[in-house]
Amino acid sequence: MLKSFPPVITPQSRFMIIGSMPGKASLEAQEYYAYKHNAFWPIIFDVFAPGRAPADYADKLQTLLQHGGALWDTLAACRRSGSLDAHIRDGKPNDFIRLFKQYPTVKTLLFNGQAAHQLFVRHFGQIPGKTYLLLPSTSPANAALSYPQKLAIWKSALQQACV
């Protein structure tokens, strides 16, 4: 059984980016979005720190948190061969209900791709008081959109969530 990571969140977090389950590279590195071809961190830095490259993983997390963000995955554990969401089996959800009671300032949920959104809705439905925004996956497996297209969509959503 693969195990996810704890949430990255502060009492000031206003939005949460929700993935499905960390991929193989992330699990090995014990870092969210560690796969070098995933567009997640480049998008975060292009939106919140244009022109600046992240110094390290702590800098990545701090940059997200400083702008009101939070990060977690829908699943706490699952079985999966490889890194593709299509191969997820026996998923066990994280306890978002408890988390949102502890951090009531989180109002907007940004889903990093269809799988994250579908898994979340399957386990939690529509949580009252939360706005759901489905975004294109930052995974390189989502080749339907170019990086500039993904960046434009994510930037708009992140700006909306920061209001």
Image (cartoon, helix red, strand yellow):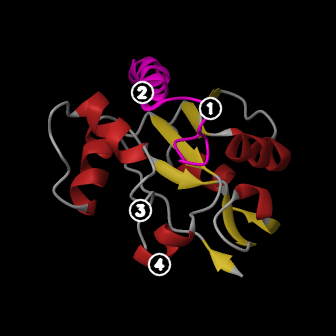
Residue drawn at (39%, 20%) of the image: 159
- Residue contact between numbered discs 3 and 2, judged by CB atoms under 8 Å: no
Mark 3 or 2 closer to N-term?
A: 3
Instruction: Determine crowd level at label 1: few under 14, some 14-19, many 20+ residues with C-alpha closer than 10 A.
Output: few
Q: Which residue is mark 1?
A: 144
The residue segment tinted magenta is 137-163
Tell me the kind of residue under disc 4: Glu
Instruction: Determine crowd level at label 4: few under 14, some 14-19, many 20+ residues with C-alpha closer than 10 A.
Output: few
Mark 3 or 1 closer to N-term?
A: 3
| Magenta segment includes 142 | yes
Q: CA distance from mark 3 to mark 1?
A: 21 Å
Quick one: quadrant of the N terminus? bottom right
Secondary structure at badge 3 equals loop
Secondary structure at badge 1 equals loop
Place of residue 136 in the rendered image (x, y in percent of width and height, measured from the top left): 59, 33
Tell me the kind of residue under disc 1: Ala
Q: Which residue is mark 3?
A: 34
Of all residues, the one furthest to the bottom in this rendering is 1
> Residue 18 or 128: which is nearer the viewer?
18
Q: CA distance from mark 4 to mark 3?
A: 9 Å
Q: CA distance from mark 1 to mark 4?
A: 27 Å
Mark 4 or 3 closer to N-term?
A: 4
Place of residue 148 in the rendered image (x, y in percent of width and height, measured from the top left): 41, 25
